Image (spheres, grey):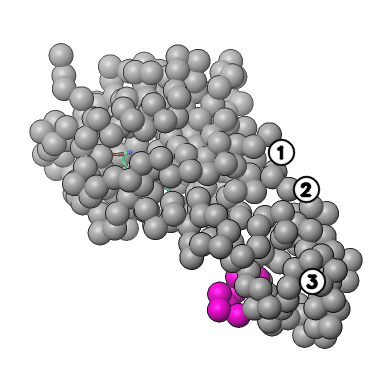
Amino acid sequence: MLKDIATPKRTKEILDKYGFTFKKSLGQNFLIDTNILHRIVDYAEVTEQTGAIEIGPGIGALTEQLAKRAKKVVAFEIDQRLLPILKDTLSPYPNVKVIHQDILKADVHNMMASEFEDVEDLMVVANLPYYVTTPILMKLLEEKIPVRGIVVMLQKEVADRIAAKPGTKDYGSLSIAIQYYTEAETVMVVPKTVFNPQPNVDSAVLRLIKRPEPVVKVKDESFFFSIVRASFAQRRKTILNNLTSNLSFGKEKKQAIEQTLYEVGVDPKRRGETLSIEEFAVLSDALYEIR
Ligand code: SAM
């Protein structure tokens, strides 16, 4: 019986066998701790009913643990050099399919229609490449990929920003962009020592559970997000100053913006970081009328 892939010894054997060298530019930090992987799969509540989508299987450390528990796993890997390795390491698991593609260019809806036809419960589970964490999460959410949720390893600093509550230093447009679609929680902080090679930054596991509907209903989604981004453009500025300097109609309509803020009960001297998503929704709907 072979040992799990995610042990220091087996990982080294696999890397040596294929003469694999890490590409830093692809965010290659492989997990070498089976215990952490079990916990990630537990947090994702993967069962034999679950279809799992993985981004960046590497040499298959997480893929293997998913394959043992899920109905089926489909993994997107950008690095061609890993394909023969994965074919070898994952050969005991017939319920795994590896797709050689950049996740940012992939048609995930199309893949799901053909690979997960008879699967009810879908989850994204991954140890993400850190150089593209935010674009990957935003793609999955904005394209409205029909999954129950997303459980991913990422930089702790990004996890903190995503899960932040109003009034904290980490709260910003990224927190709102992700919490608009999901309930976000950091479930585990992970030491550098469980990776090979060790990353430069601390890591965390983030759990996003999709909401049935976005947390607020707004007249125009892209206008709402433009208000949020403008409000956080310079964190030390008041919301009035940020809106007037960063909205296309800001300068010419400064007075109307100020009056709108008063009308919706937001003191123009407040900072963006103190507004809840609900307050941003009410504000953006009111500003929509004067744009
Ligand atoms: N899942 C493995 C593990 O936990 O040991 C590897 C995780 S490693 C942090 C990230 C993986 O994502 C690497 O295998 C890398 O080649 C792959 N990757 C990087 N950019 C990608 C992209 N745009 N699309 C798909 N895979 C990507």
**Crowding at mark 2 (Cα within 10 Å: few <14, some 14-19, many 20+):** some
Task: Please name the residue that numbered disc 1 is placed on.
Answer: 213
Residue 126 lies left or right of residue 255; in this view the side is left
Local SS, label 1: loop
Local SS, label 3: helix
- Say which amino acid is labelled 1: Glu
Q: Earlier in the sequence, mark 1 or mark 3?
A: 1
Cα–Cα span, label 2 and label 1:
8 Å
**Crowding at mark 3 (Cα within 10 Å: few <14, some 14-19, many 20+):** many
Q: Which residues are magenta?
A: 231-237
- Say which amino acid is labelled 2: Lys
Going 45% across and 14% down the picture, which residue do you hit? Answer: 48
Pick the residue in front: 218 or 267.
Answer: 267
Nearer the observer: mark 3 or 2; the answer is: 3
Cβ–Cβ below 8 Å for labels 2 and 1? Answer: yes
* Res. 234 visible in picture: yes
Within the magenta stretch, is there residue 233?
A: yes
- Say which amino acid is labelled 3: Leu
Going 79% across and 66% down the picture, which residue do you hit? Answer: 265
Task: Please name the residue that numbered disc 3 is placed on.
Answer: 261
Going 16% across and 39% down the picture, which residue do you hit? Answer: 15
Task: Please name the residue that numbered disc 2 is placed on.
Answer: 217
Within the magenta stretch, is there residue 184?
A: no
